[in-house]
Image: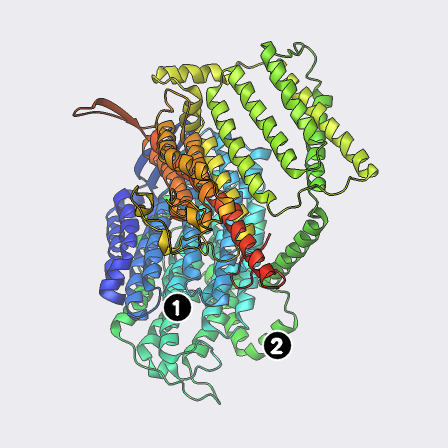
């Protein structure tokens, strides 16, 4: 079964070339994996029906007890047959539904097949975590399928709405799964159901959270709003996802967990009340709609409520009826959706007010629709009748709550009959005063998929006993009743048959009084879930605007004070509540006197920074505090940290200086006394609190330091540099997070400067491009503006001649030319020597970035463009790709970021050892280089261009203004 699931995803990845080669006929090829899965599932029928199971397991994350466990039992067999069998027919239907020139057809085909694979993996999963993974995969693929027509606003909104509702429910469900796993000691579903955790507050909370996810997936009220709007998707999507597959996932989860948790006090009230409400509200809503597809959508909502009600009550006979209804619903609702697509395709409309006489023009289509609709209305001798008879019979012999549910089921069945007849009348019969709708004929290949499904509903009505063995194998997981019910088309005259007749007659009366019912329903119509959802979103947006307007005042001092005060409140609360200083060792001022000297100088630089009025002096003094911290690292014996701190401070000071070019030389006038009086206490309190917390944290340690174990681990692997090992192996997760933060920071900085285009003004002129500019014999540049006769005759840099003479330095250019390549080589050396010496990808990337910064400072923005002609985003993206790829590579061994080491021997070189942490570090190197380059281009080269433009406008006698023509922001 694993190979079959993988085949779905592999062939889905090949959908684009297949569609390009075969057009819409590619769907026939894409139907092969689900067809093979259907055949395999049929071959396993006897195994599943006997109560046995087929299992497969792979230890995914053994350290966390998470594995990919697949298990085919009776319930999974039913769901696999529906997901694969209906999926096969829907894919064949697509070959006729779409034309070869349909836009974005390849993406649609791949997404549909990938969804089928994810759905199969979901129903076969026997592990809660892997089930959640495939659950969310179905959410993602359904989002792409619903939003297929992305040019339409309604499609985009419907896709986003479905994604929002089901994802929020899925997150709640994940929390419930985690609680289940902790309480039961395992994430294996079969083990949890065999020995459920004892009932308690945690289990009840987990049950409610899991039901939240299940009900949101199956569009049960109050989560039913997304399903009718999802009809914006093409008809094949509605027939598959919203009749046979995705919406059944929630019902499947309820049915799967009911044997172990139906007795939890919170379970039955939720599924019974919400299932009953959904059945009635969905059916009532379907009576007054005019789009055939939307009528079926609300009918689906109603049926899903009924299925949830049956599957969640938790007794053997109702579980059997629920399984039969799941099968019956797929076999009548999927063909009805497909028939609606045929009608829409042939007549050009789905509005039942405009359709007339279609049944005469398309008699075979009408026959298939009548057959499927009869099963939906539970008329004999179809499967829908046998399944509903089983439900009525089981509810009749239940307790008081079950008999109350029986009344709801009868009323809901009346509504089902009414909107079923209305569907047939509106879609196929002639209407007075409405001219016959012109239609074109449809081919047999177009009609075959819905015909096969409808015929299955007809055959399985008299032959429902054949399915009884399989469905009973699932139902037998519940406590046995005194007289177990078995599926059959005819159980004789009885109350259940009478209730079926009452439901059918009541539905016919509702249809006959359809005009009155429509007027009444519109008169007492409540707000729709869609409108409520829209108003809630609008209210949240307004609230967020008000909160943002209140908090974001545009004052850096307010932001900093807010941060410090929140930090103070949290830390003081902990200090006062726990009093951790009792028993703590007295503070030690320093290990060696040199630490005190460096700390004193650092503090002096920080205090002087508060007294100066020139911005440049403040930047230099602030930089000295960073260099002082680096010296403390050196004294403490941390050369890696010191080297990193030196490089970071150097880059930061250069960036500060670049920014200061567009700012006043001096700070604003002195701050008022009352503001100073409020800021000083906050600053002093923050400093004192942090000092106390650091002392207490260091002196009141109870656990052994983690550093000792890391040192031993590093030595065990034959490495010498502990810090580098921590960064790329032991704590690689932290490094990944920091890399993502760096990339986000670079995007944020550049977004403040560039609004639309980033490349304009960063490409060197043709005269300064090419490697010949670095040649010793290169001729002087002549095609770009040059200075006076005193300018250097030889271009030491590629674009140095683009600078004005007063901005050039021959010494700086010569030094830059001599050192640029050695510094780059040094950065690569630092990258690869990190295992045994100070270095690493972070420091190496900073050093490479400093080399590019030197080129920029010596030759200007065109020199930077010549030194780094590629976009910074390429470096950043490639770095993230490498780091993430190495992290995911570890999944093949069961652990994310697992280190792989390769040993070998090369001629002339000898033995070598190569590990995946090196590739991870290469990703960090590229990412840091891209971040530095991005920031320098934004705050250096871009500001240069703004200064040049402002000077040119001033020289021309114009007032400098915003750069409207480039779409770029002016700081």
Which residue occupies the extreme right position in the image?
A: 674
- Quadrant assignment, res 528: bottom right
Residue occupying the point 64% across, 66% down: 526
Mark 2: secondary structure: helix
Residue 841, placed above or below residue 785: above
In this rendering, position of residue 798 left or right of residue 945 = left
User: How far across and down, in percent of the image, does residue 216 sit?
Assistant: 52, 52
Residue 429, placed above or below residue 807: below
Q: According to the image, label 2 marks what residue?
A: 519
In depth, the one of 91 and 161 nearer the eye is: 161
Marks 2/1 in contact by CB < 8 Å: the verdict is: no
User: How far across and down, in percent of the image, does residue 518 sit?
Assistant: 58, 75
Q: According to the image, label 1 marks what residue?
A: 336
In depth, the one of 584 and 287 nearer the eye is: 584
Residue occupying the point 36% across, 37% down: 888
Dot 1 alpha-carbon crowd within 10 angstroms: few under 14, some 14 to 19, many 20 or more: many
- Quadrant assignment, res 355: bottom left
Q: Is residue 747 in sight in this rendering?
A: no
């Amino acid at each position: 079964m694993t190979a079959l699931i993988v085949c779905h995803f592999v062939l889905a990845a090949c959908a684009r070339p297949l569609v390009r080669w075969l057009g819409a006929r590619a769907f026939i090829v894409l139907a092969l994996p689900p067809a093979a899965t259907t055949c395999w599932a049929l071959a396993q029928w006897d195994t599943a029906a006997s109560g046995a199971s087929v299992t497969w397991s792979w230890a995914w994350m053994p350290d966390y007890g998470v594995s990919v466990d697949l298990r085919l039992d009776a319930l999974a067999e039913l769901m696999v047959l529906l997901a694969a069998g209906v999926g096969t027919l829907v894919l064949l239907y697509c070959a006729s539904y779409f034309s070869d020139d349909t836009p974005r057809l390849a993406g649609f085909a791949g997404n549909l097949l990938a969804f089928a694979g994810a759905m199969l993996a979901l129903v076969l999963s026997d592990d809660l975590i892997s089930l959640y993974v495939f659950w969310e995969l179905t959410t993602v693929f359904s989002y792409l399928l619903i939003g297929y027509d992305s040019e339409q606003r309604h499609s985009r909104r419907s896709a986003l709405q479905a994604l929002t509702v089901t994802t929020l429910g899925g997150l709640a469900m994940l929390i419930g799964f985690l609680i289940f796993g902790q309480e039961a000691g395992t994430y294996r579903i079969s083990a949890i159901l065999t020995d459920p955790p004892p009932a308690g507050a945690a289990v009840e909370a987990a049950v409610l959270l899991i039901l939240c996810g299940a009900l949101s997936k199956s569009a049960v009220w109050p989560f039913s709003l997304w399903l009718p709007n999802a009809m914006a998707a093409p008809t094949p999507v509605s027939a598959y996802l919203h009749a046979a597959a995705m919406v059944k996932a929630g019902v499947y989860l309820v049915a799967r967990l009911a044997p172990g948790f139906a007795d939890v006090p919170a379970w039955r009230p939720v599924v019974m009340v919400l299932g009953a409400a959904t059945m009635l509200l969905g059916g009532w809503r379907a009576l007054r709609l005019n789009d055939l597809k939307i009528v079926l959508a609300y009918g689906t909502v109603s049926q899903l409520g009924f299925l949830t009600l049956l599957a969640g009550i938790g007794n053997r006979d109702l579980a059997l009826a629920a399984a039969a209804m799941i099968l019956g619903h797929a076999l009548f609702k999927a063909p009805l959706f497909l028939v609606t697509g045929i009608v829409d395709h042939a007549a050009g409309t789905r509005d039942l007010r405009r359709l007339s006489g279609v049944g005469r023009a398309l008699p075979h289509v009408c026959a298939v629709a009548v057959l499927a609709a009869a099963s939906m209305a539970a008329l004999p001798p179809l499967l829908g009748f046998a399944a509903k008879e089983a439900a009525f019979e089981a509810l009749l012999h239940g307790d008081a709550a079950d008999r109350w549910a029986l009344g709801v089921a009868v009323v809901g069945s009346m509504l089902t009959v009414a909107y079923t007849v209305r569907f047939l009348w509106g879609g196929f019969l002639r209407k007075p005063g409405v001219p016959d709708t012109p239609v074109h004929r449809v081919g047999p290949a177009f009609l075959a998929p819905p015909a096969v499904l409808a015929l299955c509903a007809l055959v399985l009505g008299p032959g429902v006993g054949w399915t009884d063995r399989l469905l009973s194998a699932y139902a037998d997981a519940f406590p046995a009743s005194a007289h177990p019910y078995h599926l059959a088309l005819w159980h004789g005259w009885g109350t259940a048959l009478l209730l079926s007749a009452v439901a059918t007659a009541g539905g016919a009366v509702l249809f006959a009084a359809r005009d009155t019912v429509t007027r009444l329903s519109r008169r007492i119509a409540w707000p729709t879930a869609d409108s409520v959802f829209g108003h809630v979103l609008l209210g949240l947006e307004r609230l967020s605007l008000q909160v943002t307007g209140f908090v974001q005042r545009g004052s850096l001092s307010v932001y900093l004070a807010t941060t410090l005060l929140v930090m103070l409140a949290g830390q003081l609360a902990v200090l006062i509540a726990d009093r951790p200083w009792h028993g703590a060792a007295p503070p030690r001022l320093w290990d060696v006197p040199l630490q005190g000297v460096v700390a004193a100088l650092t503090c002096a630089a920080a205090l002087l920074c508060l007294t100066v009025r020139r911005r440049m002096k403040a930047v230099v003094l602030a930089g000295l505090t960073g260099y002082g911290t680096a010296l403390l690292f050196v004294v403490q014996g941390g050369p890696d940290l010191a080297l990193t701190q030196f490089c970071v401070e150097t880059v930061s000071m250069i960036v500060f200086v670049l920014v200061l070019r567009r700012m006043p030389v001096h700070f604003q006038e002195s701050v008022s006394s009352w503001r100073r009086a409020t800021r000083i206490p906050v600053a002093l309190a923050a400093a004192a609190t942090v000092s106390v917390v650091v002392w207490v944290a260091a002196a009141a340690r109870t656990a052994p330091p983690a550093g000792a174990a890391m040192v031993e681990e590093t030595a065990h692997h034959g490495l010498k540099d502990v810090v580098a090992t921590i960064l790329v192996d032991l704590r690689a997760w932290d490094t990944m997070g920091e890399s993502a933060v760096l990339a986000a920071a670079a995007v944020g900085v550049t977004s403040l400067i560039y609004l639309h285009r980033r490349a304009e003004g960063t490409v060197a002129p043709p005269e300064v491009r090419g490697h010949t500019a670095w040649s010793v014999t290169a001729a002087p540049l002549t095609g770009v503006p040059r200075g006076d006769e005193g300018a250097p005759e030889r271009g030491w840099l590629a674009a140095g001649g683009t600078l004005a003479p007063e901005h050039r330095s021959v010494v700086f250019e010569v030094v830059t030319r001599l050192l640029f390549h050695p510094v780059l080589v040094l950065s690569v050396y630092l990258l690869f020597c990190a295992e045994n010496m100070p270095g690493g990808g972070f420091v190496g990337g900073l050093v490479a970035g400093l080399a590019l910064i030197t080129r920029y400072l010596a030759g200007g923005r065109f020199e930077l463009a010549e030194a780094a002609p590629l976009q910074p985003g390429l470096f950043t993206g490639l770095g993230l790709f490498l780091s993430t790829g190495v992290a995911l590579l570890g999944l093949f061994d069961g652990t994310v970021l697992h280190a792989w080491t390769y040993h070998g021997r090369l001629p002339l070189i000898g033995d070598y050892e190569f590990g995946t942490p090196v590739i991870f570090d290469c990703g960090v190197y590229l990412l840091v280089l891209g971040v530095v380059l991005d920031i320098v281009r934004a705050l250096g080269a871009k500001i240069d261009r703004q200064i040049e433009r402002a000077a040119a406008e001033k020289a021309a006698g114009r007032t400098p203004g915003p750069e409207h023509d480039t779409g770029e922001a002016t700081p």
